[in-house]
Image (cartoon, coloured by chain):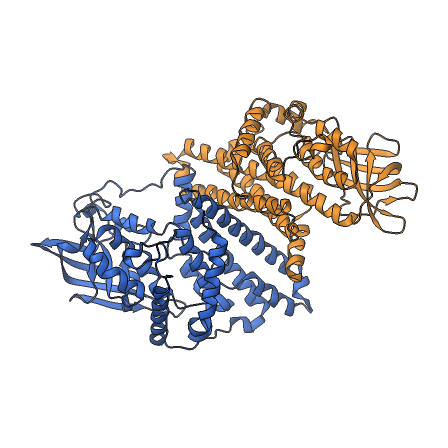
């Protein structure tokens, strides 16, 4: 059995040696274009050093390692604030799906440039009327000879504005039940008829987009999976990353930072650290965060022995993000009015106000809290599915969502 | 792999579960709720016969020499059935002080189950108090409030002070002269809670290097054992609520289809998974002699109490009217969850342990 602690130590040392050049301090104050350029160089360095696509086969430029090693590396990497987010989706879902469903020539063509950070892929799933309810997507694709013609709109597409390629789920048959009429493709984002418009989020960032398709023509050879089999491929996509990087602080500031603020702040003229409410906040964070770490330790051991991942990821996301929201607000309270200060050059991992402002996005993206609870209740505890009036109805007879 | 149960440990769990299934029944437990200072004698007999009383005690003291991990498996399984006697928890905690204090005879009596112990530490709202005085000729004077198991335990380990104010631990026979036990009816009578009054009762001073530290460790063990019981109890709440939500129809469908119900049950599960991992983490750290273990014990205690109390309340709510009847099992959990929460110190006590730990770090 590989020694994961040793792996972690080696990875951390390597990451630390490059932190000054590519990490949080190097990124501070950069324009997004410059930050992306720096991120691409960082990705290239990882590729050259065997740290890109750690769990991917070596034949596709990966490291041939385990998923656990990949998750451990990503956890350590996150601590230094490298500019990795541009490549997260690209390497997390679209390329692994290509590796599973595309032919060998395409795999070789696309895996390496993506791993090197030269090309970025996006995942065109959600739409204005279909988020958690993925099977409700409406973007139409109709067959025309050897081609498919796509018309409609996608929404919340991360990094589409920088993407060279994308994978997409479309509705090819509206006359059957919603899960059955979907088909999955890959496409070049420069194909005529595609328009990408960034959506400015509540936190001021523009990492997601709306993407419009106006009679976009792509060949049938770009189909992944069977006609009508798109929902299955989409679920496969979402299952690919079986165990992702996690941070008990929800990638917000660490508890230690909260304790430091509490040590210097006062409440009604007395040290905040001596106040029972502060101490309760600290204890609540500690008990939950250490439990998440323990769950993770336990899960890593089980995965090493060949177990399948369970609900740990859902628990981690639910608990860490809610806690991050509460802790961020509590820390801002301890800083008084200055706690609301929003320095544009600081990152959520090191700044409570940024952390607070960004966390609502994270409680929705990648599985809203409510969907995670549904999954736990239905898959694990055997509770029945919600009432779903549109389930067995042909899609074209369902009332559109308003 | 310290965080994963071994085959032997899984086997112990199966055996405990099987033995309890044939021993503990809800009708007996309901009866005990109305009997002040009584406990489930058939459960206790099973605990003795099966060697659960001996598990955590060293072989040279007549025990089985198993680790805290195994002891906590028994705690969890007894909590699952809301077992009607608290003496495994109190014995496990007391044994730590008896071992360090060289009390081989008492350890043997604990291991065989011939005697049951109580941990007389609390005074009013303070779980670790030492206003009881131990005189130079080893006589105790003062009062310990609402002590778990004290109504029926044979002896108690008492946290007290010398006449010059130095903290000490002493052992006192609860049937001896100068000891008055006052039992009173509680929300969960089989916990055998009693207030102990000492009027010059003769005691044995435990020779310890750092009695305060040993007292904290004993309380930590009590808290961790109770946390194990809480996790088992929470599992039962989840199972009962899930089963009822699948069966019970309202508005034309199973109530489990409503997210208000379904999510409440999922939240119980999330809280209990945190508690379960947290307890194992604390146990592994105690076993390894980790100097920070105390903060992790506190975390386990807080997680488990939170999981059990919130789940017992929510599971009762899921059951609607039937959940608040005497015949339904929900109130056994509702009562036990609150009793456990009060038995080894309120949240602020444990929260403070954590904050103090992090402040110093």
Display colour for chain B: orange
Q: Quadrant location of the C terminus of chain B?
A: bottom right
Residue A250 placement (x, y as % from top left): 47, 58
In the displayed structure, would residue A23 be above or below residue A375? Answer: below
Hue used for the chain lettered A: blue
User: Image quadrant of residue B243?
Assistant: top left
In front of the other: A34 or B268: A34
Evaluate whether residue A8 shows in this view: yes
Please tell me which residue lies in front, A84 or A384: A84
Seen in the picture, residue B315 relative to B19 is either above or below; the reply is: below
Residue B349 locus on image (x, y percent): 68, 51
Percent position of residue A229, x then y: 21, 46
View extreme (right): residue: B137
Residue at the image position 63 percent from the left and 25 percent from the top: B50
Position of B228 with respect to A189 (left or right) is right
Query: Residue shown at 56%/61% (left/top)?
Result: A255
Q: Residue furthest left?
A: A145
Give residue B339's position: percent from left, percent from top: 65, 39
A281 vs B273: above or below: below
Give the residue displayed 76% in from the left and 38% down from the top: B98
Residue B229 in view (yes/no): no
Q: Residue at x 53, y 30 (%)?
A: B11
Asked if A106 appears above or below B312 in the picture, the reply is below
Residue A176: image quadrant is top left
Position of residue B32 in the picture relative to residue A328 (left or right): right
State which quadrant residue B94 falls in.
Answer: top right
Image-based side of A338 in relation to A53, left or right = right
């Amino acid at each position: 059995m590989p020694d994961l602690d040793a792996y972690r130590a080696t990875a951390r040392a390597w990451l630390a040696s490059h932190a000054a050049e590519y990490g949080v301090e190097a990124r501070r104050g950069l324009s997004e274009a410059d930050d992306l350029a720096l991120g691409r160089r960082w990705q290239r360095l990882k590729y050259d050093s065997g740290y890109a696509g750690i769990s991917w086969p070596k034949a596709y430029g990966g490291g041939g390692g385990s998923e656990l090693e990949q998750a451990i590396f990503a956890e350590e990497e996150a601590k230094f604030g490298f500019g990795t987010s541009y490549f997260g989706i690209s390497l997390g879902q679209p390329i692994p799906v290509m590796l599973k469903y595309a032919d060998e020539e395409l795999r070789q063509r696309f895996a390496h440039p993506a791993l090197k950070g030269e090309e970025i892929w996006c995942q065109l799933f959600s739409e204005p009327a279909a988020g958690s309810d993925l099977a409700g997507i409406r973007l139409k694709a109709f067959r025309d000879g050897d081609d498919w013609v796509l018309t409609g709109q996608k929404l919340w597409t991360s990094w589409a504005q920088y993407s060279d390629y994308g994978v997409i789920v479309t509705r090819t048959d509206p006359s059957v039940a919603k899960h059955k009429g979907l088909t999955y493709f890959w496409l070049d984002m420069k194909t005529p008829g595609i328009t990408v418009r960034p959506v400015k989020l509540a936190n001021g960032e523009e990492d997601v987009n709306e993407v419009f398709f106006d009679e976009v023509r792509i060949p049938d050879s770009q189909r992944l999976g069977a006609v009508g089999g798109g929902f299955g491929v989409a679920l496969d996509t979402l299952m690919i990353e079986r165990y992702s990087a996690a941070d008990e602080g929800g990638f917000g500031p660490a508890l230690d930072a909260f304790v430091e603020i509490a040590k210097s702040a006062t409440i009604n003229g007395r040290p905040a650290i001596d106040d029972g409410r502060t101490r309760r906040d600290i204890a609540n964070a500690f008990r939950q965060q250490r439990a998440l770490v323990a769950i993770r330790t336990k899960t890593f051991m089980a995965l090493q022995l060949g177990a399948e991942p369970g609900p740990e990821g859902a628990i981690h996301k639910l608990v860490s993000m809610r806690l991050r929201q509460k802790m961020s607000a509590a820390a801002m309270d301890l800083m008084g009015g200055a706690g609301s200060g929003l320095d544009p050059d600081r990152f959520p991992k090191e700044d409570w106000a940024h952390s607070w402002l960004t966390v609502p996005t994270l409680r929705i993206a990648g599985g809203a809290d409510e969907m995670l609870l549904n999954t736990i209740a239905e898959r694990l505890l055997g509770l029945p599915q919600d009432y779903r009036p549109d389930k067995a109805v042909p899609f074209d007879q369902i009332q559109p969502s308003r | 792999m310290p965080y994963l149960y071994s085959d032997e440990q899984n086997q112990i769990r199966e055996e405990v579960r099987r033995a309890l299934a044939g021993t503990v029944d809800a009708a007996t437990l309901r009866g005990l709720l109305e009997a002040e200072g009584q406990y489930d004698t058939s459960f206790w007999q099973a605990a003795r016969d099966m060697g659960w009383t001996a598990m955590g005690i060293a072989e040279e003291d007549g025990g089985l020499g198993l680790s805290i991990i195994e002891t906590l498996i028994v705690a969890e399984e007894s909590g699952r059935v809301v077992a009607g006697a608290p003496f495994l928890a109190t014995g496990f905690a007391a044994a730590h002080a008896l071992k360090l204090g060289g009390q081989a005879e008492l350890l043997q009596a604990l291991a065989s189950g011939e005697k049951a112990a109580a941990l007389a530490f609390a005074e009013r709202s303070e779980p670790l108090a030492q206003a009881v005085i131990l005189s130079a000729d080893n006589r105790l004077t003062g009062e310990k409030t609402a002590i778990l198991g004290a109504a029926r335990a044979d002896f108690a380990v008492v946290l007290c002070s010398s006449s010059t104010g130095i903290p000490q631990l002493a052992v006192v026979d609860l049937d001896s002269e100068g000891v008055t036990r006052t039992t009173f009816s509680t929300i969960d009578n089989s916990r055998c809670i009693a207030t102990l009054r000492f009027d010059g009762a003769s005691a044995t001073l435990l020779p310890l290097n750092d009695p305060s530290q040993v007292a904290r460790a004993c309380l930590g063990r009590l808290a961790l054992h109770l946390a194990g019981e809480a996790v088992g109890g929470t599992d039962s709440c989840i199972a009962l609520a899930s089963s009822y939500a699948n069966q019970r129809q309202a508005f034309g469908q199973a109530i489990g289809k409503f997210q208000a119900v379904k999510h409440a049950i999922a939240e119980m599960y999330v809280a209990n998974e945190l508690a379960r991992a947290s307890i194992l983490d604390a146990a592994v750290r105690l076993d390894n002699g980790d100097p920070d273990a105390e903060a992790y014990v506190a975390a386990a205690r807080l997680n488990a109490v939170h999981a059990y109390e919130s789940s017992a309340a929510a599971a009762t709510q899921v059951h609607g009217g039937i959940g608040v009847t005497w015949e339904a099992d929900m109130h056994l959990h509702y009562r036990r969850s609150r009793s456990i929460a009060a038995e080894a110190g309120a949240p602020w006590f444990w929260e403070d342990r954590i904050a103090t730990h992090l402040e110093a770090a």
